[in-house]
Image (cartoon, rainbow, N blue to C red):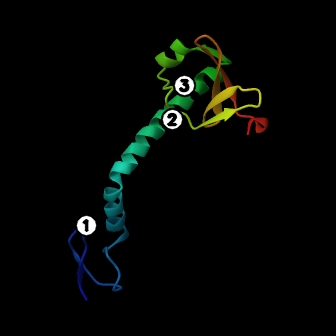
Amino acid sequence: MKRICPVCKSEFDGRIDKKFCCDQCRNTYNNRLHQETNNFTRQINRILRNNRKVLFEFYSNNIRKVSKEKLLSAGFNFDYMTNIYRTKTGKIYYFCYDLAYISSDDDYYNIVERKEYVE
């Protein structure tokens, strides 16, 4: 039985439940189907990667205490983080993957690296 591929409109043979002529058409169809969700996720991941990059630039240069202004001017977005960790003493660490920041003084943040005891 001949069927028509919904992506490229070509005729193809195969199993009775086969919907696409090839893997490329199947992938194209599913990418289009989930495009809006993928774009939203891509935007968030881009922000998270940028946040980690900003934290890493300060951390790798042995700058552990940074003002909020410097973080913002470097492109840091405080609305996005990967997780939050609260210690028993009430300190709150805001993580961006393996690096975190914690409020120290007014408008200053300490940058720390994730350690085993933090998990």
Residue identified by numbered label 3: 54
Please tell me whether mark 1 or mark 2 is closer to you in this view.
2
Q: Earlier in the sequence, mark 1 or mark 2?
A: 1
The disc placed on residue 48 is 2
The picture quadrant where one finds residue 110 is top right
The disc placed on residue 81 is none
The disc placed on residue 7 is 1
Where in the figure is residue 39, as x and y percent of width and height? 37, 45
Callout 1, which amino acid?
Answer: Val
At numbered mark 2, what does the secondary structure look like: helix, strand or loop?
helix
Q: Residues within 10 Å of mark 3 (few under 14, many from 20)?
A: some
Where in the figure is residue 9, as x and y percent of width and height? 20, 71
Which residue sits furthest right?
117
Taking the image as shown, residue 5 lies to the left or right of residue 59, namely: left
Where in the figure is residue 63, as x and y percent of width and height? 65, 16
Q: Earlier in the sequence, mark 3 or mark 2?
A: 2
Please tell me whether mark 3 or mark 2 is closer to you in this view.
2
Residue found at x 39% / y 49%: 38
Residue found at x 49% / y 29%: 79
Q: Residues within 10 Å of mark 1 (few under 14, many from 20)?
A: some
Q: Earlier in the sequence, mark 1 or mark 3?
A: 1
Q: Are marks 1 and 2 in contact (CB under 8 Å)?
A: no
Callout 3, which amino acid?
Answer: Val
86 vs 21: above or below: above
48 vs 6: above or below: above
Q: Quadrant of the N terminus?
A: bottom left
